[in-house]
Amino acid sequence: MATNPPTGDGHRNGAVRERSQTYNPRTDHWVKRDTTNGRFIDQKSDDKPFKGIRKE
């Protein structure tokens, strides 16, 4: 599979697999979820969404 150069610079090619994020209006933060079992994994400390994770 081809990737765009430069390689090894620490950035991701494509989205994170088996993860999704949803917005919680009650806390005004984004929450990361595991799509295999539906558990919540992490919550952002600011109001910006996670990078590279699809939104529900």
Image (tube, rainbow, N blue to C red):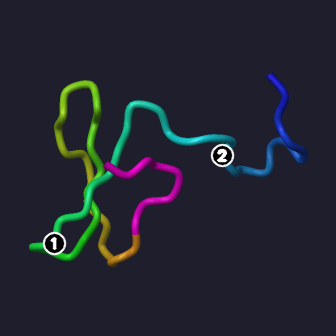
- Closer-to-camera residue (53/8): 53
What residue sits right under mark 2 in the picture? Answer: 12
Q: In this view, does 39 lie above or below 26?
A: above
Count of all numbered marks drawn on residues in the image = 2
| Residue 14 placement, left or right of 33 | right
- Closer-to-camera residue (55/32): 55
Q: What element carries label 1?
A: loop
Q: Along the polypeptide, which appears first: circle 1 or circle 2?
A: 2
Check residue 53 for magenta coloring: yes
| Residue 15 placement, left or right of 28 | right
Check residue 14 for magenta coloring: no
| Residue 2 placement, left or right of 18 | right
Q: Quadrant of residue 15?
A: top right
Q: Which residue is drawn at 28% across and 36% down?
A: 34
What is the magenta range?
49-56
Q: Residue 25 carries which label?
A: 1
Mark 1 neighbour class, 10 Å CA radius: few under 14, some 14 to 19, many 20 or more: few
